[in-house]
Amino acid sequence: MVLLRHMNLLNLIRRTNPISNFYSYNLGKIRLYDSKNMTKEDWHNLRPMIKKRIEHRSSSYPIKSMIPVAQQVLRARSQLINGVSTLLKAFPVFSCKYCPEVYVGEMGHLIKSCWGYKRLNKNQLHRWTRASLENILVPVETFHLESRGQEIIKHHQRFDFERVPAVIELCHQAGALMEDSKFRSPNDTPDFVVDSLSTDDLIAIGTRTLGAWETLREGVKKLMLVYSVKVCKHCSEVHVGPSGHMGRLCGVFKFQSWQGTHFWQKAGVDDVVPPTIAWHRRTQDPPVLVNEGRSFYGHAPAVVDLCCKAGAIPSKKYLCMMKVHGLTGPSFNNVSS
């Protein structure tokens, strides 16, 4: 009697609820594959199909619609390098000797944020030196692959493949044609006297450089939606390709049982184009930034800060980070007294 009552209730739910009726009707048509119940004959037939698909997965690449994006990224990268190289000659930029800290200004700040060589010390004053192009645009290199369908790079093959910038390798796999010299030779920097540039020229260079920075990052973001880029979970190693390499180059766990094997995960734009965040000095800030006012000061990518010093107007997305309308902190004279 109770069973009959439950069956009547179930029939009533099926008649009144079309969604449950749909799933109950189509559930028998769905074919489920279970590795435990799969016979050897089925796996023997599926294995060559899977292997063939893996071997020919690169046949649909490069995608024609993404080729103009890759070419635009290469042009933006060249303009960015030339612009930053020019602005480095016109404005003083400093980098710490013992950490990656960068500062754009007449002299280095006094904020105790240096962690020392190999992170041996923390909250120390920086030791400033003149910055170079690599301090602003941090180079990120990866293995150069001839095609996306080639075999995974083994550890003993790590010296057989050339190391190239990750942005260039990404554009190469996206179909941007380039000469072999683009992979090997350093980028050409502009050869002219910076003192001859007027204020309007510096504003134009800063605006063009800032636009190239935004174009580069937006283009890399679009390419990474289509082409796979991996980054190690424990270090900054980047690999452009469908799967990471097997080189045991991760130094974080080199004494552990896995002997330096990378733990690959999906990379972001900051992994391929690092922004190098620096302290930003506003007009209401004192000439020298002190440690007591670090909660008042803002930050900005070093490229954006350098272009702003040249007279370029930053994008609205950086205003919150830069704390443009924030309160001013204590000055050096007030702290010393």
Image: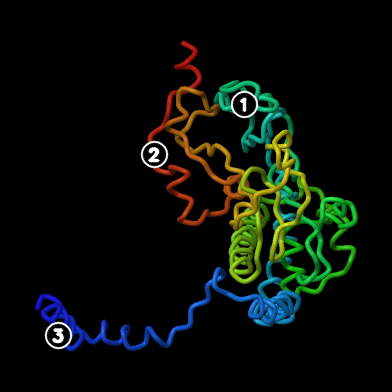
Front disc: 1 or 3: 3
Residue 1 appears in view: yes
**Circle 1: is it few (<14), some (14-19), or many (20+) Cα within 10 Å?**
some
- Label 1 to label 3: alpha-carbon separation: 70 Å
Mark closest to the chain's N terminus, 2 or 1: 1
- Label 3 to label 2: alpha-carbon separation: 65 Å
**Circle 3: is it few (<14), some (14-19), or many (20+) Cα within 10 Å?**
few
Residue 273: x percent and y percent?
65, 54
In-front residue for pair 26/330: 26
On residue 115, which mark appears? 1
Q: What residue lies at 70% left-to-right and 46% top-to-bottom?
A: 138
For the residue marked with disc 1, what is the amino acid? Trp
Kindly identify which residue carries mark 2. 326
**Circle 2: is it few (<14), some (14-19), or many (20+) Cα within 10 Å?**
some
For the residue marked with disc 2, what is the amino acid? Gly
For the residue marked with disc 3, what is the amino acid? Leu
Lateral position of residue 194 relative to residue 111, left or right: right
Looking at the rendering, which quadrant does residue 97 occupy?
top right
On residue 12, which mark appears? 3
Lateral position of residue 87 relative to residue 193, left or right: left
- Label 2 to label 1: alpha-carbon separation: 27 Å
The answer to whether marks 1 and 3 mark residues whose Cβ atoms lie closer than 8 Å is: no
Asked if residue 36 is positioned above or below residue 85 in the image, the reply reads: below
SS type, badge 3:
helix
Lateral position of residue 146 relative to residue 1, left or right: right
Looking at the rendering, which quadrant does residue 78 occupy?
bottom right
Residue 193: x percent and y percent?
81, 48
